Image: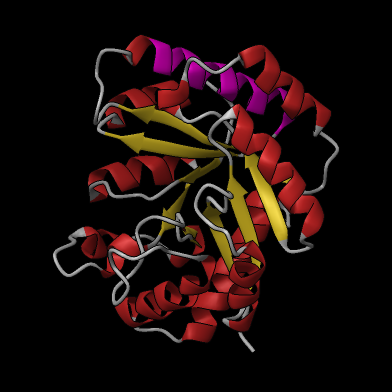
Amino acid sequence: MITLTDTHSHIFKEYYDNIDEIIANAKNNNVNKIIVAGDTIKSNLEIIDLAKKYNNVYICLGIFPENFEESLTEFTKIVEDNINNPKFVALGEIGLDFYHDKTHKKEQIELLEYQLKLAEKYHKPVVIHSRNATEYTINTLKKYKVHGVIHCFSGSLETAKIYLKMGYYFGIGGVMTFKNSNISNVIKEIPLDRILLETDSPYLAPTPYRGMRNEPKNIKIIAEYLAKLKGITLDDVSKQTEENVSDVFDI
């Protein structure tokens, strides 16, 4: 039987009032591990408790770029209090987002650098969000001795080659299945041993559920699409991506 991992989700009470059901749905669709990424102080505290409740839930602790007004002192305490928590697998979701607001580039870069320093200090992988900020993201990452995954990768093949050379993995999700998406052409060229599967739940549900609330069970749809795209079996995708999960997150 195949085994899959959703390496990026936001299973928050804000979005789901049936979390027990969401976790069960995932297990019933061969998704045996779920990584949940925080984006605020509140969500980080929430997912720490979530991981205590569910054996198969792991967490990334991070402050999303647009939430730069959050308390870094409080965030640092959360990170340091959980350094020995085996469920804490990465710093994320962190990065840069200049899509909606270009007036706070400085604050976003400072927040990213602060969190990259924490990752470097505590030897944690990073989960990077980058939207309309490729050059800034690459230049910032190059300043630190960190590794991890580029979440929801949607860049060019040229950009992919830069990240490959830097040692990063690529989070691939529902966008790949969209009818007018060009990212599939890039994903064809990315080695399978550098790909991680993710839903970004509750966002970006894959076809045929596009526009609906996403959930971790849909990783199986994404894995099946990736297998077809690369001309390999679902078992091949399962085996290699699970190895990749172990390599990046040590779970």
Q: Is residue 110 left or right of residue 50?
A: left
Position of residue 30 relative to residue 106, above or below, is below
Image location (x, y in percent) of residue 157 = 25, 50
Please tell me in which quadrant of the rendered image residue 18 appears: bottom right
Image location (x, y in percent) of residue 189 = 30, 62
Position of residue 154 relative to residue 101, above or below, is below
The answer to whether residue 188 is seen in the rendering is no
Q: Magenta region, mostly helix, strand or loop?
A: helix
The residue at 56%/57% (across/down) is: 7
Q: Nearer the viewer, residue 54 or 227?
A: 54
Q: Nearer the viewer, residue 237 or 223?
A: 223
The answer to whether residue 206 is seen in the rendering is yes
Image location (x, y in percent) of residue 127 = 53, 41
In the picture, which quadrant includes the N terminus?
Answer: bottom right
Q: Is residue 35 left or right of residue 203?
A: right
> From this viewpoint, which residue is outermost toward the left?
180
The residue at 79%/25% (across/down) is: 80
In the picture, which quadrant includes the C terminus?
Answer: bottom right
Q: Is residue 144 left or right of residue 212?
A: right
Range drawn in magenta: 107-123
Residue 110 colored magenta?
yes
Q: Nearer the viewer, residue 158 or 116?
A: 116
Residue 100 colored magenta?
no
Please tell me in which quadrant of the rendered image residue 135 appears: top left
